[in-house]
Image (tube, rainbow, N blue to C red):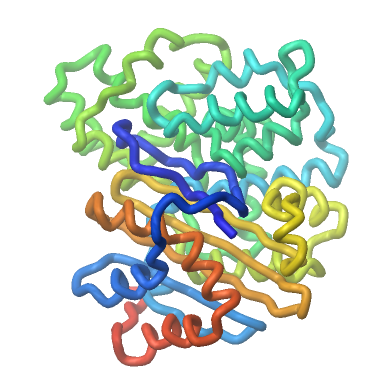
Amino acid sequence: MVIAIGVIVVMIMSMFTVAIIIIRKQSKKTEPEYFHTYMHQPGTNYSFSLKQNENEECSVHNHQKMPLASTVKLLIAIEFARQVSEGLLDKNEQISLTELDLFYIPGTDGEAHPEWLSQIRQQQLIHNSHVNLIEVAKGMMAFSSNANTEYLLLRLGLDAINQQLTLLNLREHDDLYHFCTAVMIPAYLGEQYENEQVLDKLTKMSQDEYVLLAEQLTTELADGKLQELKQKVMPMSENLQRIWSDRLPGGTTADYLHLLELINQKTVLPKNMQDILDEIVETAMTNPRNQTWLKHAGFKGGSTKWVFTLAAYFTDHHHNTTELVFFANDLEPLQLMKLQDNANEFMVKIVKDKEFLKTCAKVNRGFVVPLNKAE
């Protein structure tokens, strides 16, 4: 079972997860124990929450807010499912690929959007340069297309999405904004200021000003403007990239563990809404080999050059449930690569190997002193 999370590429402005692919050949030996190694290293900045069969197995730094990267797209998926289930959106509405392309910013998503386009072409899901709305949502979740994400943020409405924070009782979660388009802000400022001034302006810019500027740029993209500016976004200095990464919407593993439990229980959300959500989040379950041992499985992860996030839930045919959330920030390149490379086997061993799960739980039994909310 393999859930590919992504690779480190030359374009270090990555915030993506590759499609959930449960079965593929491993080209190299995995090391799921690396997660234990990382968590035991002094000075690491991470948060880890784990439940199995409603029992909390591990909770370390679980109220420490971290940039969420693409894992935040779970929240967008939930609002999408609600609006479709209530008849506010038609999941079979035909969406123009040209309209989606307005939001595609080359070099900033690890080729997630082009890879999604390639797959839906192979699956013959494109008709007259249009695709069903439900496929747009799947592309956001399975491939983590940022273009699809920004399109859906506009269609669903930020206010409606952020209302889910209250409805789902996510108490430590930042409001969402047009965080994918925000990657264009340095290039936009660069049209008016010198390079040194751009960094100074961004550093001093309040979060409210930053969010409003991202909204302005998204509106202009939707109107077909700024298409030349998109080509100037990359390459970008590391300092500017770090500002973007640090300003991403943040959340805690405590909140996301709660969210995963709601999804995994299958009894909390209205059935029509749950069915739509499963369709776009549980794409792993289309693989027959997963169906032999899993009843449900859903996953979302994300990364920047410094951030790695992972949220997953499982229910097997014996009704055993597992929810796990792992967030890390301030990563070195080798740490990020190792976390990405070993995430799939880490999750699988937690679900299937009781001894491995016990080892994970030991992180909370003296090896690490948990942070409190004030830290």
Residue sitting at 30 percent across and 83 percent down?
A: 368
Q: Residue furthest bottom?
A: 366
Image position, residue 354 (x, y; %): 55, 85
Q: Is residue 238 above or below residue 185?
A: below
Image position, residue 149 (x, y; %): 57, 35
Locate residue 138: give its quadrant: top right
Q: Residue furthest left?
A: 196
Locate residue 329: give its quadrant: bottom left
Mark yes or no: residue 105 visible: yes
Residue sitting at 66 percent across and 70 percent down?
A: 261
Image position, residue 86 (x, y; %): 86, 45
Q: Is residue 20 left or right of residue 178?
A: right
Task: Point out the image quarter for the N terminus.
Answer: bottom right
Locate residue 233: give its quadrant: top left
Image position, residue 83 (x, y; %): 78, 42
Name the foreground residue: 15 vs 4.
4
Residue sitting at 76 percent across and 25 percent down?
A: 125
Name the foreground residue: 353 vs 82.
353
Q: Is residue 73 left or right of residue 138?
A: left
